[in-house]
Image: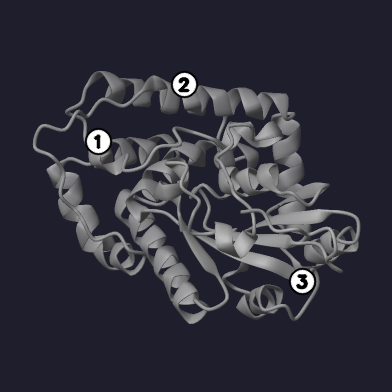
């Protein structure tokens, strides 16, 4: 099933919408890799209308696969609606919305937060190394709970949200996203992250007009990839974690289609260093490759200038 785009007057641009740490990069790159209308150009996380305008100027010569984070646009929904509803260029042939289990998002965000703290100048490389050591303790001791690790993070990185506030914040963001998708269900075709990692893109292929297989080649964005697995929360969350987290997250989970909170009594709580302590050290290496302290300074300067 591959549509013939050779005689169309406009290119089959694709909008991929999702929340941070929900697999949007790998899904958008998978769509790009399979796109029959070449050349295809991947646009990474435009945050303002002017970023969209720059990309639109290239739309005559390239098919755009544009990854947009809802986190960047939830305070400018009118602009996002104009973009998605074909009221402003580029005109999208398909609009894909990604959903992921919010419980896995909580874990994924926690693993990635030190990198953002480094870039914003709120953490030092030695802090991230200490964080990797904390994760190693959890890898070696399965009795350590998720909330124990969250508390250790808050202690190591002062002035960050405490565990309950962080989870409450993610729950609120997920509810906002679920409400937006409900209001725009006729515009977006939804793909579950869990299906994508299982190499099942059938939900979006009719909208795209071509078949998709997941790619492991994320190019220069490879550092964003962690485990690429689903239901990681079941290994991380102990009964005491679930009691607290369910109270905060049950509604947004249900709104996004995730209602099962049961975990096997004999579940293997092993978490792999590759996706946790070594992932943290990999982000630290990426930070150093990107210029480290110099880039963090530029990021802080930009935030002050354009606040």
Asked if one can make out residue 261 in the rendered structure from this viewpoint, the answer is yes
Disc 1 crowd, CA 10 A, few/some/many (<14, 14-19, 20+): some
Residue linked to disc 3: 91
Residue linked to disc 1: 235
Where's residue 235, x and y in %? 25, 35
Which residue occupies 75% across, 58% down?
4
SS category of the residue bearing label 1: helix
Residue linked to disc 2: 278
Q: In front: 222, or 77?
A: 222
Which residue occupies 41% across, 28% down?
276
SS category of the residue bearing label 2: helix
Label 2 vs 1, first from the N-terminus? 1
Q: Which mark is residue 105?
A: none
Colour setup of the view? one colour
Task: Name the side, left or right, on which 135 lies relative to 118.
Answer: left
Q: Nearer the viewer, mark 3 or mark 1?
A: 3
Label 2 vs 3, first from the N-terminus? 3
Where's residue 41, x and y in %? 79, 49
Asked if one can make out residue 125 in the rendered structure from this viewpoint, the answer is no
Residue situated furthest top in the rendering: 140
Where's residue 272, x and y in %? 35, 23
SS category of the residue bearing label 3: loop
Q: Report the Cα–Cα distance between label 3 and label 1.
A: 42 Å
Q: Report the Cα–Cα distance between label 2 and label 1.
A: 18 Å
Q: Report the Cα–Cα distance between label 2 and label 3.
A: 41 Å
Q: Is residue 160 above or below residue 178?
A: above
């Amino acid at each position: 099933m591959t549509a013939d785009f050779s005689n169309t007057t406009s290119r089959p641009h694709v909008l991929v919408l999702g929340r941070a740490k929900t697999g949007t990069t790998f899904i958008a790159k998978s769509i790009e890799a399979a796109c029959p209308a070449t050349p295809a150009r991947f646009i990474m996380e435009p945050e303002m209308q002017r970023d969209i305008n720059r990309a639109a100027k290239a739309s005559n010569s390239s098919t755009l696969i544009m990854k947009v984070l809802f986190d960047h646009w939830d305070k400018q929904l009118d602009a996002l609606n104009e973009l998605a509803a074909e009221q402003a260029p580029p005109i999208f042939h398909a609009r894909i919305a990604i959903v992921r289990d919010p419980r896995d998002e909580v874990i994924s965000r926690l693993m990635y937060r030190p990198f953002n703290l480094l870039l914003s100048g709120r953490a030092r490389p030695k802090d991230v190394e200490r964080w990797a050591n904390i994760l190693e303790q959890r890898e070696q001791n399965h009795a350590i709970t998720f909330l124990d690790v969250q508390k250790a993070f808050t202690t190591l990185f002062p002035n960050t949200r405490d565990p309950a506030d962080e989870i409450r914040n993610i729950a609120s963001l997920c509810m906002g996203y679920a409400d937006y998708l409900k209001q725009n269900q006729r515009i977006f075709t939804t793909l579950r992250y869990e299906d994508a990692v299982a190499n099942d893109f059938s939900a979006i292929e009719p909208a795209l007009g071509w078949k998709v297989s997941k790619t492991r080649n994320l190019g220069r964005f490879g550092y964003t990839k962690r485990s690429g697995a689903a239901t990681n929360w079941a290994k991380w969350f102990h009964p005491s974690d679930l009691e607290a987290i369910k109270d905060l997250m049950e509604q947004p989970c249900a709104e996004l289609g995730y209602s099962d909170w049961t975990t096997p009594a004999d579940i293997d709580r092993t978490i792999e260093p590759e996706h946790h302590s070594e992932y943290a050290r990999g982000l630290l290496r990426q930070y150093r490759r990107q210029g480290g302290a110099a880039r963090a300074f530029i990021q802080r300067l930009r935030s002050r200038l354009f606040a």
